[in-house]
Amino acid sequence: MVNIKINNLAVQVEAGTTILDAARAQGINIPTLCYMKMESAGCTNAPGSCRVCMVELEGRANLVPACVTTVWEGMAVQTNTTRAIKTRRTVVELFLSNHPKDCLVCERNKNCELQTLAADLNIREDKYAGKMAHHEKDTTSESLIRDPEKCVLCRRCETICNEVQTVGVYSAINRSLETTVSTAFNAPVADSTCTFCGQCVSVCPTGALTQASHTSEVWTALNDPDKVVIVQTAPAVRVALGEEFGMAAGARVTGKMVAGLRRMGFRHVYDTNFAADLTVMEEAHELLDRVKNGGKLPILTSCCPAWVKFIEHQFPTLLDVPSTCKSPQEMFGAIAKTYLAQKLGVDPKKMVVVSIMPCLAKKYEAAREELGNNTDYVLSTRELASMFREAGINFHSLPDEDFDPHMGESTGAGTIFGTTGGVIEAATRTAIYELTGKNPENVEFKQLRGTDNIREATVKAGDTELKIGIANGLASARKMLENIRDGKSQYHAIEIMACPGGCVGGGGQPYHGNDQSIIKERAASLYAIDGEKKVRVSHENAEVKKLYDEFLEKPGSHKAHDLLHTKYVKRAK
Amino acid sequence: MSDVFISKEGVSFMEKNEKALYAELDAYIGSLPTKQGALISVLHKAQDIFGFLPKEVQEYVAEKLDIPTSKVYGVLTFYSFFTMTQKGKHRVNVCMGTACFVRGADKVLEKFERDLGMKANTTREDGLWSLDALRCIGACGLAPIITVDGKSYGRLTEDDVTGIIETTLAKEEAK
């Protein structure tokens, strides 16, 4: 232990602690900008370059950055001397001198770390107005927008993309005023190996990386009397949306969300969880088919579009490994424009399918032609919240309402699709039924739960032992895939989700500052909803059964293949 | 990866074939004790071998060193020594750092532009000359300083320029 003083307060801290951590443990806030802990991957973005966290040390002429300076015996830190405060203010004023001043119309207005710093540091004038950098906006992708003029060079996107996701899209390029964070050869992000997971957007402190927004297209459709606009909502949205309205992390707001969507003008409100149950039926069938008939093992889940794009770029020789199942979003779209259109007596050409997703890659997925373009617009959880505000809907006073029939029923299995381990647990429940003719005695497979980046478990299904692997975050996915490629993998089935924590930690969710406790709360709520459901296995979803009886025949049928399965494309590294 | 090697007369690396150039780079990378932290020296070597660093060479280096292509591009665009465009047979670099500038480097550069009939930071149509204005090359005591095909000429005035061009061409004929 090391004895130090922070603002004259004597404290003991472990050797190797940074001044920033030591101060925060005492409830002393030192402002930061570039600094961010990325707990899920055990790394920290601390280039020490923004100089916003400068503090004064007794006996030292120069100030030091608190985020990268570790304590030593006898250190005496002053965090709020006139000199420290002035220095920080000057640093932020210099950032502002090269930052657009269009806060009022910026997507991050009221939710921007630079804006908050400027306000907290009492900056009241544009002191260093001068030459500013000019960079083109990159609007080439369906998922995200890059506006390098708003970049503060914190490098968080670079760290999360390179180290947490091992995708390596971003690097700082050029120098001096031309410095920016960009792709190789400064190419449009749409032409890069970007998976559109949106994690870079979720850590960007400013409006330099934002979601591509589709709210105005959806408003237009909702107000078009010739269109029948329906909506599906992904599982992870209902346990995060409340945060946008000041509720606690993980607040369960399913009923209010449904009610709000009806008030916005959606003709019918359905559940992606229904399509998740449908996915389980097809995926479990495919798994057992591969197990029984000596097909390719392991089988990989294919619900996550970022993960699918990752394997297409990084492991193009392994494209026979993922399940051929479309994701729940795309299964929903395909069934909505056929079966549901018949049920409702609606011309599929007049039907507009909107989906509310915790994810930015889902926007890209909806534009993949081989999936049939059945999902017309994808909105993130954040976009939905912004539309509620725009429409003057008082979220807190909304009643709880239920989903509409035909594609609104879901089981506990479909619900847990929104968290790491959930998809494979749901599939396991049904695979056991298919193998043994009986439901598992206990449907909760605790060994498949948790937040470790890589997990494995063996599940007994009668005489068969199913070996299951789970990875979340693309660095872990890469390890899993390397093992498969090198013939070291022993698994029957592997679930991969690109975002740390799974969809609850998706790039379209309310900003969480990479705080894993928030993501854990959201996951816990999904498991709680599952626990309260009467039906917890996908094969007992009455509406799914009806869909097979009346329309698809059985899992893996010719029609199911046409509508619910897909293929993958080799892409350049 | 062939189209970037389309020949311009007088471009020396075209005399070897592409495969041999990559083999030379492979041998260099293979000789390194570790690939970690080797990017800058590998880029130096690659530019030595190829004359410049086109996209394909950067992608090749990224693959060999197992780092993202974006990183290679990031380092390359940071250091003005590295270039993505093909250079002429003779390379003139004029230092425009502060010390050289105040001692008349701009006049030296202008004289080269006039004598060679070309603009700074370009390669002449016939592929014979490249003329680049560089940031400080770290020899301020000899300001203003230039390098021609790797050889330094210090404490210049614009009157020295014509002579340097003639000497460079004469060396070539002597070969």
Image (cartoon, grey):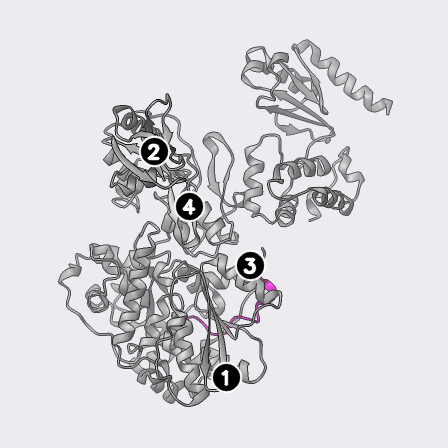
Q: Mark 2 points at which residue?
A: A52
Most foreground residue, A165 or A421: A421
| Extent of the magenta region | A312-328
Q: Residue furthest left?
A: A397
- Name the residue nearer the viewer: A546 or B89: A546
Are callouts 4 and 3 both on one chain?
Answer: yes
The kind of secondary structure element at disc 4 is strand
Q: Nearer the viewer, mark 2 or mark 3?
A: 2
**Is label 2 in contact with label 3 (beta carbons under 8 Å)?**
no
Crowd rating for badge 2 (residues with CA inside 10 Å; few <14, some 14–19, many 20+): many
Q: Earlier in the sequence, mark 2 or mark 3?
A: 2
The answer for which chain carries disc 3 is: A
Mark 2 or mark 4, which is nearer the start of the sequence?
A: 4
Secondary structure at numbered mark 3: helix
Helix, strand or loop status at disc 1:
strand
User: Which of the numbered marks, if any, corresponds to residue A422?
Assistant: none
Q: Earlier in the sequence, mark 2 or mark 1?
A: 2
Which amino acid lies under the numbered mark 2 shown in the image of this protein?
Val
Q: Distance between the residues labelled 2 and 3?
A: 38 Å
Let me know if residue B152 is in the magenta part. Answer: no
Q: Name the residue under label 1.
A: A464
- When the figure is inspected, residue A126 is found, relative to residue A502, above or below; the finding is above
For the residues labelled 1 and 4, the Cα–Cα distance comes to 42 Å
Looking at the image, tell me whether mark 4 or mark 3 is earlier in sequence order: 4
Q: Give the residue type that dot 4 points to.
A: Thr
1 and 3 marks in contact (CB < 8 Å): no
Q: Residues within 10 Å of mark 4 (few under 14, many from 20)?
A: some
The tally of labels here is 4
